[in-house]
Image (tube, rainbow, N blue to C red):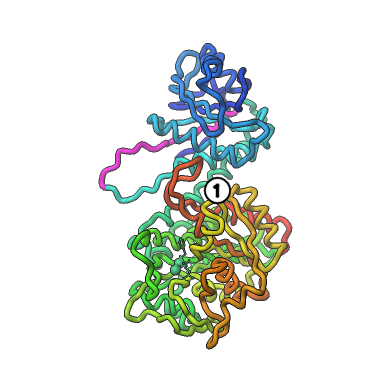
Amino acid sequence: MKVRVVQDDATTVETDGLIVNLFEGVTAPGGATGAVDRALDGAISELIANGDLKGKLNDVVILPGRRGVRATRVAIVGLGKAAELNIDRIRHVSAEAARALRGRGARRIASIVHGAGIGGQDVAESATATVEGALLGLYRFQGYRSSDDTVDVEELLIVEREAERIPAIEKAVERGVVLAEAQNLTRDLQNEPANRLTPTILAERARAALEPFGIEVAVYDADWMREKGMGALFGVAQGSEEPPRFIELRYRGGDNGPPVGLVGKGITFDSGGISIKPAEGMELMKTDMSGAAAVIGAMQAIARLKPRRSVVGLIPATENMPGGRAQRPGDVVRTMHGKTIEVINTDAEGRLVLADAFAYAQSLGLRPVVDLATLTGAMSIALGRVRTGVFTNDDATLRVLLAASERSGEKMWAMPLDDEYFEQIKSDVADMKNTGGRPAGSITAAMLLKKMIEGTPWVHLDIAGTARSDTVKGYHVKGGTGVGTRTLVHFVEMLSADGTS
Ligand code: BES
Ligand code: MN
Ligand code: ZN
């Protein structure tokens, strides 16, 4: 989709669908909405007077255009109560309005920047959010249907009247495009079925998406893993006929602090292995590479936004399958840093592949390290589908991560990680075991990771509950959500600003 900023007036911009907005409880609209209302002979005020238009958050009412405006139709989207407006609401509102217009067949849409006038929000941030919302809300996975009669929006215009605001808005709009395209790249990878996204293909897709932007992409095979002594990753991989890959992505942004490590769980399909999962819902395990996808998406945005800090993305990619060579419950594996793990349940494979990725991250001197993983079903028992659980061994890094999530609108919640939880994963035969029973399942999983990253400041995001959506709401659409992508980008930007780790 083409996104452009135009200096124009809401009443004169030519488009299939113009988006203006309304706060809840406003009876006489002002600004662009007021101008459009006057051009439409008071049609908007009349709707309000009749109680057909209330400005409730995310409500969209569509009117015919013509008369005094050049738009074919006008969408009035509700901003909700003025006092409750925030940047994330702007994203959602923008998404709802854009989708409503697409539903009417509009191919060219135009929007004013939401929330910047009497809304009192920062103009640049609002412009970024307006674009992010529209592009995320209009996202559709291309898929594999042989006939497809859906119409896509081809052009989004951001309309601004004041000439002196245009340069700032142009910059902000470009930023929105970069961030939303990165998140939609993450979603594309998540939504791909596992036969179309093997570890080999994931590596090729990473190369295709990142090399054009200057990211260095290195892809390692099973022999390399064996040489490195990555026994935990190898244990998972050996049950699959599909060869594993270890993907290393490098962005050179200068030596403003050590390179930041972004690690993503890349299980392209999780059958559970010998501890096989029940059939029902197993198809959803094609998204068990959502952490990897978010790292790839984030690296693309980082390459385009160019923060002054180097970043290395690491992705251990493999299937988890119950083949003849598969590891067995009770097996003991050894990680690259020489720690031993008793594999009680082969379905707790995420922590195994991350363990070796962490050892490698440490060998490269990356700090801090952030990992994203669809790690535990228990995460959605704890926090549902609303918030991502975050775990850490370093409060300073956690604060930066939470500030980044505030900026992205991706809701997170800090979980505890007291040493007492280690009791649950003590093993009789190895340094630890890979499951700790049902109580606090997400925390004991994170505890194993904590042992594997000792000495490095680290934050772990368990995105098992938030990586997928079953509903369409605001900028969330069905399927992969792309969660984590924008938070990672903001996180790196914040670290590059102060240069610390
Ligand atoms: N990939 C799953 C976790 C998951 C479950 C993600 C549901 C998204 C939705 C992970 O590999 C897994 O199987 N975890 C087990 C751990 C258990 C065996 C200790 C789980 O959560 O059941
Ligand atoms: Mn599993
Ligand atoms: Zn898994």
The residue at 51%/58% (across/down) is 380
Q: Main secondary structure of the magenta part?
A: loop
**Viewer-closest of 385 and 226:** 385
Q: Is residue 469 above or below residue 358?
A: above
Residue 168, visible in the rendered structure: no
**Viewer-closest of 44 and 135:** 44
Spot the residue most to the bottom.
Answer: 429
Q: Which residues are magenta?
A: 146-160
The residue at 67%/53% (across/down) is 403
Q: In x, y percent, where is residue 467?
A: 49, 55
| Mark 1 sits near ligand 1, with its Cβ under 8 Å away | no
Crowdedness near tag 1: few (<14), some (14–19) or many (≥20) residues, C-alpha within 10 Å: many
Identify the residue under disc 1: 179
Q: In x, y percent, where is residue 482?
A: 49, 53
Query: Is 158 a magenta residue?
Result: yes
Spot the residue most to the left.
Answer: 146
Q: Is residue 34 above or below residue 417?
A: above
Residue 378, visible in the rendered structure: yes
